[in-house]
Amino acid sequence: MLAFDVGGTDTKSALVDADGRVLGLRRTPTPLDGERTAEAVVGRVAELAAELRDAHPDVRPIAAGLLVPGIVDAERGVGVYASNLGWRDAPIRDLAEQATGLPVAFHHDVTAASWAEHRLGAARAYDDVVVLVIGTGIAGSLILDGRPHLGGGYAGEIGHSPVADEPRCPCGARGCLEAIGSAGAIVRRFAERTGEAVDGAREVLARAEAGDADARTVWEAALDALAFAVAQLAATVAPEAIVIGGGLSRAGDALFVPLAERVDARLSFHRRPLLVPAQLGGDAGLLGAAIIARESVGA
Amino acid sequence: MLAFDVGGTDTKSALVDADGRVLGLRRTPTPLDGERTAEAVVGRVAELAAELRDAHPDVRPIAAGLLVPGIVDAERGVGVYASNLGWRDAPIRDLAEQATGLPVAFHHDVTAASWAEHRLGAARAYDDVVVLVIGTGIAGSLILDGRPHLGGGYAGEIGHSPVADEPRCPCGARGCLEAIGSAGAIVRRFAERTGEAVDGAREVLARAEAGDADARTVWEAALDALAFAVAQLAATVAPEAIVIGGGLSRAGDALFVPLAERVDARLSFHRRPLLVPAQLGGDAGLLGAAIIARESVGA
């Protein structure tokens, strides 16, 4: 299978063979071309596909998996909206099938990465599980009763679920989890309080641990916001586990232990979700792309 | 089908014939007997079953549907927990099958009522729909991809999803929707502010409309809390519609219009759920009991 994971900055591509080995993994810049970005992305995907086939003549891909961020209508193969790629209702699957000459399975990046965690990684043991990716932003995906729940492409937007009445989020709504609990928000809010730029959320955490009051305030607000969102999920969809990936999850126990304490304090009779670190890392998307490509052609 | 809907105060019972006609509908007090309440309830159900069969000798029920509130493990037939009925892990389905001599389909009351709304009522047009029952408390149920999502019996507890950090809820958690947005909370919070007892939430609404500032504060806080919870659902499970029933829904436009405005103001790119009044009224549970009984025996 050919696998492509198109992000706002980079596109990852690889060939995944029948044994699940990842060959020729590359990261190339995603071409941005204003209103023609969808066409530019598909053109790049076709080039990468040709290069992968040339480099591995012994592997014959029979389908491709193509992932994009934003709101995705997987059924119709349409990129509905992606704030960082600028398209609206772009028929990306059809364009990619024409350009590559292969059947293309088209899906949302985090949904496919979550599906890989469900098939191969940390979510394997659970029928009802939420995957939460906490990085610059916060994305999520729901697997309920063993199947991805898509909600027409709109489900799992946990980063834009309200946890408070403020601050205003760039998405237009108020009090979104992402505006308080993401790694990006932690860095931004620390800078707003102190006028100091830091390298990343992990540096804010290190300063909080060293006793810096501003860092502590920002970090604890992030934990509280994340615990609030987990409690919402426990009450409404009641997952057995929440698998947490993304840059912030690499904080390990410094994140998982106080978060679990706060979740515990927020809940009463609810089913308490286990908080579990993601296992597949940054290539979960590519593996997910290969899995959905394989499933789409029944191979 | 025999249909029983056991509530904290009353038990409703009826015979539902093959054409869906409801015969012999009765409401009798639910027997409370401390730690033996499960046995007492099953005993009453068996008596009611015998009476219904005697009164309608021409209808031969081949199964019964039995609904209870609280946390329900439908698969194992167990009432896990019900605050107002006091049982813990009671094997109610098995007891009821022994007592009635019929196969018994056992389920959660609001889940079954929601299923009836999905099969026969206001939720019929939607694959992804949340049913919200706003009365003394707030209960809910999720139908996702055309199937009830149960989460081991813990899903749909939207009344105990956080919308704020306070007040303390009787369930033990903080800032639960039910503690602000239910009809019960509206009455209680108005009384706390004014020292005045009112008949019900509709009276608080009437006073708010007449310009009473306390009534207005309480009513608007309830609307804001409900809108917050709807926005959470839109971001996480993205239902096409939210069907609203229960006592408060009878306020009609006075509830639905300002709630829809507030939901609209809270959302940005999200799928905006239609807010739809429930259609089946208080007997949705009995109809749901008959439907699940029929489905359980493949009739």
Image (tube, coloured by chain):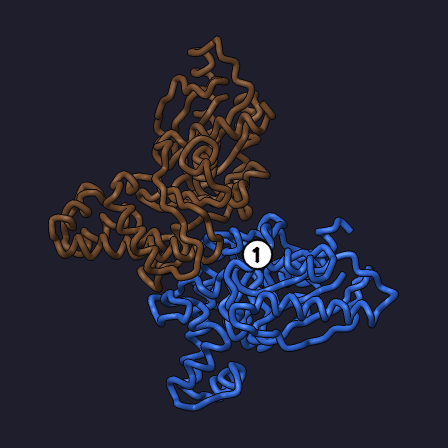
Chain colours: A brown, B blue
- Local crowd size for mark 1, using a 10 Å CA cut-off: few (<14), some (14–19), many (≥20): many
**Which residue: 74% across, 55% down?**
B294
- Name the chain letter of the residue that bears numbered label 1: B
- Between A139 and B99, which is closer to the camera in this rendering? B99
Q: Is residue A55 left or right of residue B116?
A: left
Q: A180 above or below B276?
A: above
Q: Is residue A239 left or right of residue B128?
A: left
Judged from this view, the residue extending furthest toward the left is A211
Q: Is residue B177 left or right of residue B25?
A: left
Q: Quadrant of residue A69?
A: top left
Disc 1 is placed on an element classified as: strand
Asked whether residue B123 appears in the rendered view, the answer is no
Judged from this view, the residue extending furthest toward the top is A58
| Position of residue B163 measured from the top left corner of the image (x, y, whole percent) | 40, 65
Which residue is identified by label 1? B78
**Which residue: 42% across, 72% down?**
B179
Quadrant of the frame with the C terminus of chain A: top right
